[in-house]
Image (tube, rainbow, N blue to C red):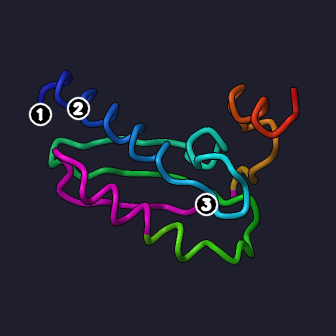
Amino acid sequence: MEIEEKLEIEKRLVGVLKSIYDPEIPVNIFDLGLIYSVEVDDNHVVHITMTLTAPNCPMADSMIEEITYKVNGTRGVEDLDLHLTFDPPWNKDMLSEEAKLELGFL
């Protein structure tokens, strides 16, 4: 896969991830800082490493289901490899400036 194609798919994926909101916080999961990395390999498999605001998040299953559905439905994506981690643990410093403003932290 050419680098331009990979970058275009990754750009689409960021848009997709910004359309998914944490049900308990009115901020999308990308600006919330839950997405640690998004990479597309030469076989069009998307590798996402992410976390949750807390390990016992009651909405984890529905959020992961929505991510899987939307990412797999993105043009140029063949499959998703989603890795959930709690290292490093999420904290408020991971919020984007936009999210901090939205939540009143600025």
The disc, 3 or 1, on the residue closer to the chain's N-terminal end is 1
**49 relative position to 55: left or right:** left
For residue 85, the mark is 3
**64 relative position to 88: left or right:** left
- Residue 19 image position (x, y, % from top left): 47, 47
Residue behind mark 2: 6
Residue behind mark 1: 1
The question of residue 83 being in magenta is answered with yes
- Residue 94 image position (x, y, % from top left): 73, 38
Q: Residue at x 42, y 38 (%)?
A: 14
Residue with the most extreme right position: 105
Q: Residue at x 80, y 36 (%)?
A: 93
Q: CA distance from mark 3 to mark 2?
A: 24 Å
User: Does the CB distance between marks 3 and 2 fall below 8 Å?
Assistant: no
Q: Is residue 56 above or below residue 104?
A: below
Q: Is residue 90 above or below residue 13?
A: below
Q: Residue at x 59, y 47 (%)?
A: 28
User: Does the CB distance between marks 1 and 2 fall below 8 Å?
Assistant: yes
Q: Please tell me how crowded label 1 is: few (under 14), some (14-19), or many (20+) other residues with Cα within 10 Å.
A: few
Q: CA distance from mark 1 to mark 2?
A: 7 Å
Looking at the rendering, the stretch of residues picked out in magenta corresponds to 66-86
Secondary-structure class at tag 2: helix
The quarter of the rendered structure image containing the C terminus is top right
- Residue 34 image position (x, y, % from top left): 62, 49
The disc, 1 or 2, on the residue closer to the chain's N-terminal end is 1
The quarter of the rendered structure image containing the N terminus is top left
Q: Residue at x 24, y 50 (%)?
A: 74
Q: Identify residue type, mark 3.
A: Thr
